[in-house]
Structures are given as structure tokens and as C-alpha cells.
Amino acid sequence: MSNAGRKDDHIRINLEEDVGFHDLTTGFERFRFVHQALPELDLDAVDTSVVLFGKRLSLPILVSSMTGGTGKAGLLNRRLAEAVEHRNLAMGVGSQRIALEDGDTASSFAVRDYAPNALVFANLGAVQLNYGYTVDQCRRAVEMVEADALILHLNPLQEVVQPEGDVRWAGLLSRIEAVCSSLDVPVIAKEVGWGISQRTAKLLIDAGVGAIDVAGAGGTSWSEVEKHRAVTERQRRLAASFREWGIPTAASLAYVLAAREQAGRPELPVFASGGMRGGQDVAKAAALGAELTGLASPFLKRAVVSTQAVVDEIDLLADELRIAMFACGAQDIQGLRHQGVLIEGVSSHVAAAGKPSLQAMPVEPVSFPQREQGIETSPSEPSSGVGLASFAARWLPRVEEEMRSTLSASHPSHATHYAMMQYHMGWADEALQPCTAPSGKRIRPLLCLIACEAVGGNPLDAVSTAAAVEILHNFSLIHDDIEDGDTTRRHRPTLWSLKGVPQAINVGDGMFALAFKALLRAGWSKEDHAASSLKLSQTLAATDRFARMCVALTEGQHLDLSFEERTDVTVSDYLQMIQGKTAALIAGSSALGALLGGADAWLVECLDRFGLNIGLAFQIQDDILGIWGDPAVTGKAAGNDILRRKKSLPLLYTLKHPAAASLIEPLWRDDAGEESLPAILSCLEEVNAKGWTEERLHHHHSEGLRALSDALGSQSESSLLKDLADELLVRRR
């Protein structure tokens, strides 16, 4: 049978026949949400949006890959695409093999014409890589639909029960790895309805896939679909014998998440599809760790009717998801993942029906990775009694998500530019492939979020601004590394040393502009993009504060660079320099958080003063580590600041002493190397430079806490701002 005939068969059979599992379920019936009779939350405040591959979606829903390649399929794809565009979701097309081999069918996959802004996934059968397909065909599939990612679907069982199926699967993994390393967009590995095991997930992650769709058992049984296509009784019996085969979706989700954790790839998106039917399924999947939930059958049945019927189905799912989140007290998707929101236990009606529980299945043990600590709370609730680590665990993933959205390419031709940003941020390796690398403690966004809450605001309102602050900070680091000639940062090559100065400058400039983009996002409503007068006023004030912070950064950097040529730099000059270069950004983080939390001008000024002094203490601590820090922790050689002839605070204090200055200055003039370090360090020790510098650190720390007390009164002692300030005193990197 032709490819086109097979595709129309699949549509007809799915619509007309009973092709679901009879006994095996998805496993989601085992889970129940803990109902909150006092959710302390308005329904309108529930945020169902997520960010994936740089695009913000209104719902964590994927209109799963279904069809294409025939006239009927083209009509269905058009209606699905129109609905996806209307409601801002993600969408996958069916296998494009037919269009690659018969160009006349390509128009049936032209979903981008109807969904210009949607997150769109191209799709090919992975096994075709064993039948002559290469990266070229994969690239053509992506270009055909202007896709944001490519799905390589895995369907070995379906292939072997098809009369015309492809049965050569040996050696496929290495070919998938080659595609992952060569394609400019992420590769998504997806089963079609029998699930992915932990072992398979680990192999795929190691091969470099950008996401995994578990597509587990419990929905459509594709062996049953093939039974209805069989032309002989033997083929029908063979296909029918596998009707209950597969890993339930909930179990497969657990396996893949465990493999992700084992591989050290917590950022890798995992999708849950396979038998997902309603908004509560979407909520459960999200609560268990899925970034997207894929649904096919509910949308296919509506697409046969009209675009509006698909939109109506989406709206029903959205309402079910939103109400489920509201009733369990979760303001956003991240809030669903708090421990205690979802509980596990086989339902009585399922047990009574004689359906097997997952616990009785002879498969790998099912265990979901530990979800975030903190039970039955909403992200909008005050964090009193919550430690700094818990606050960071709750909110920094939101900031990270916002930054990834901001620093993502909107077109494949720009992918390398943004991949270099992602390398600097610790999200990509030296080959610009996704990875997890050291990325800093995110102190500045933490300050912004905590300050917002400290004055009575909701940290959710400050997430975009916190992301803007961190992006701005990282822009400055890229340029600093160039100007200072540093070749390593966070134990990795700096961007300029890896990709050259011109590209690094351009990447930094891009991040500078994108920081403002993230900042301005805070002032707009998620629903209709219309700014309220209050939000607009806050945004203008925040933009002014942000711009002044940028100017202070450049002023401080100017002084720092000029100090290299001056011999008359004083301690006072140095403190003025770091007030702009380092402290201004930390002060601005605190002030911006307070501003977005609704604080008045006096309160904003107090928290600005708090941040300024903590920033000065922070830089002074860096100066101490730059001379006496442990290289294994700092990633830089001992005495690095001395060898760079950097006029840091301990050196400037030492140079105030004539005897020490007379020994140190000649060494500098003669380009002192490592052999001179012992003599210089001895001079610093003689004048107790380290002790004096530590006293300055404690002075500014105390001044910062005094400003915090002015702002918060007696509550300052229990504030997370104090905890963070104290932690900076004992850091080692």
C-alpha cells in the first residue's frame, strides 16, 4: 500500500474503530491532588503558561504529531494549526517521509502558513536513518515546516507488525547521535504509544537529544490499529496479541525523569503523552515533572468538524487545568510540583475492576525523582519560615526559564549566536551543544525576588526583572573577560577565548539589548498584552533605575581600566570604582525588587542602600579570594590578581606603606611573574593587608544590615535578605 493510503487508513481507523488498550491504563489514575478548601488564590491569578525552546506557551499542551501527506490530512493539519495559533500552543506534524519522497504532498504539512508564531515540531521516523536518510533529509523536514525542533519517532513494534514495516533497527543510536550533533534545532525522541524505558532514555540523552516524549501505553494501541489494516488472518492475530504491550505513561515518565537525573541533565525537557485525555491529566503530568503533555485523539476528532471545534476543546482543557491548579492551591505550573500537592494510591474502582496496578507489573521499579520540598503551598504565599535554599529552589527555576526564553533563537539561522550566549550562561558546552555547566549562584536575581517579597509583593511579579538583572550581569562579564584578558571563567574557557573577540563582543551586545527586553516584559499583562497604568508606571520607574544601573556599570569599568595605567590610585578611588562596577548592580537588584513589590520611595532607597553596601562587601570578598583563594574552588591561580597587576583593595592598602611599596612597585615595573609572588605576599602579610581588608568587608556588611533594619524594622532579623547577606561573608568562590 502507498504511504498516502496508509496515512488515510490510520486516520479512518482511529476515528471509527476501538483501538485503545482494554486492560492496561496510563497509570495516572493512581494519583490524586490534595484538595485545598482554602486555596488563598484567585482563579484569575492562576498562570498556566510555560516556556519551551524559547517560546512562551499559554498551556503546557502539545497537539501531538498526527498526520499529513494527503488532501484530507492537509485539511486536518490546517485546522489544528489555526487552533494552535489562536490559543498559543505547541504542535507536531505527522511523519514527513511521504513529503520528502513526493514533493506534491508537502503542502499538506504547511502548518506554518496557519500558525506563524506557534512552536512547531517537524517529524520523521528514526528508523529511516537505517534506510538511507541522513542529516540532509532531517534538515529538509525542518525547513519544510520552518520547525523549531525535529521529532525522531521510535515505533519498532508498529513497524514489525506492519506488512510493509521497516525492521532493521540495529545501529540506529549512532545515527541519531549524528543528527543531534549536526542539526541546528533540538531533536526530540518520541515513542508512538508503548513508552520509553529508563535504559533507552539514558542512551538517548547520552546521544544528545534535546527532549524526550515518553508516549506511553494507555491510549491508542498502534498494534490494534495495524490489526485493522491487516490483510491476512495471521497478520491480524499477530498484531492483536500485542494489544496490551507497553509501559504505562506514568511509569515511562518516571523512568525518563530518573534517567535525566542520572545523566545530570535536569534542564532536558520531558513530555508526557499516551492516553492523555483531559485537563486533570495535564495537571498530573506537570506535577510529576513533564514540561508538556501531548494529546492527539481529542483534537483529531474535533479537527474533523472545524477549527472552532478544536479551539473549544483547547478551552475546555484549559479550564479543567486551571481549576485543578486553583483547587490544589498552585498558582503556576511550578507550584504543582511542590511535594504534597499530589499523592499516590491505586483508586478503589480501578482495583475493583480487576485492572492491574503498576506496582504489580514486572518492569523496572517506578519512582519519581524527589519533587521540590515545601508541602501544600502556593508560590504566591509569603516565605516566612522558609529557608534561603527553599526560596531559591522555588523561584530560581522560574528565572532560569525566563532567561532561556529571552536568550533563545527565533530562527535557525541565528542559532549559533544564541548558542554562544547559552555557552556563557552554562547551558551549552564548547561545541555549543546543550549541557549543564557551572553558572554562578544567581545572587542578583535572588536579591530582586526576595526584596520584592520583603516589602509585601509577589515574587512572580519580579521574575522577568530578576532575569533581566542576571542577563545584564552576564553581559558585563563577557565584556570584562575581553577587557581583562581572562581566558577562564567558572572553570571553563571564556567566550572570547573560545570564539574570538569580535563574536564575543557581539554576543555581549545582544545580551545587553535582551536584558531590556526581559525587563519590559514585566510591565505587560499575560492575557491581552495591555499594560495597566500602575504596571506602566512601575515599568517606567524600573526602566529608569535599570538604565542608571547600566551607566554606573560602564563608569565603574572605565575607572577599573584606567587604574591599570595609573600609579596614584588610592583606596578611596578604588571604593568609588567598585561602587559602580559591582555594587551598583547588586543595589539595583534590591531596589528593583522593592519597586516591583509596590514599595514607596523611602523603602526603595533603604533597600538600595542595603544592596550597595552588600555589593561593596561582595567585591571586597572577591579581592580577598583573588589573592588568597583556593585555586581548586575559584578556578583561578593563587595570587591571580597580583600577577594581573590588578590594583585590588589589599594591594592598594599595602602600597600605602612606603617600605612595602618600595619592594612591590619595581616588581610590577619589571612584569613580575610567579617567581615574585612569595616576596609580594610577604609584603602583604607584614602590613596585615588581609586582616585590614576583612575589617572593611565587615564594615560594609554591617552598614548593609543597618539599612535593612531601617527598611524592615524588627523583621529584618528573620529576613531572607539578611540570610543572603550573611551567606556572602562565608562564600569561597
Image (spheres, helix red, strand yellow):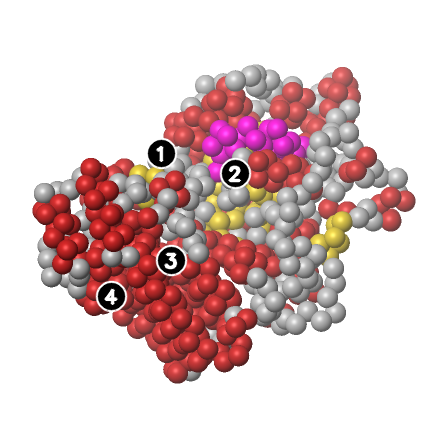
Specify the segment rendered in magenta.
190-210
Element under disc 4: helix
Q: Residue at x 74, y 63 (%)?
A: 35
3D distance between C-alphas at marks 4 and 2: 41 Å
Q: Residue at x 57, y 48 (%)?
A: 292
Which numbered disc, 1 or 4, marks the residue closer to the eye?
4
| Mark toward the start of the polypeptide (1 vs 2) | 2
Disc 3 residue type (three-letter): Glu
Viewer-proximal residue, 101 or 541? Answer: 541
| Mark toward the start of the polypeptide (3 vs 2) | 2
For label 2, the crowd category at 10 Å Cα-Cα, with few meaning under 14, some 14 to 19 and many 20 or more, is some
Q: Is residue 655 left or right of residue 513?
A: left
Labels 4 and 2 touching (C-beta < 8 A): no
Q: Which residue is mark 2?
A: 264
Disc 2 residue type (three-letter): Gly
Q: Which residue is mark 1?
A: 431
- Say whether residue 207 is magenta: yes
Residue 197 screen position, x and y as percent? 64, 31
Viewer-proximal residue, 681 or 555? Answer: 681
3D distance between C-alphas at marks 1 and 2: 18 Å
3D distance between C-alphas at marks 4 and 3: 23 Å
3D distance between C-alphas at marks 1 and 4: 39 Å
3D distance between C-alphas at marks 1 and 3: 24 Å
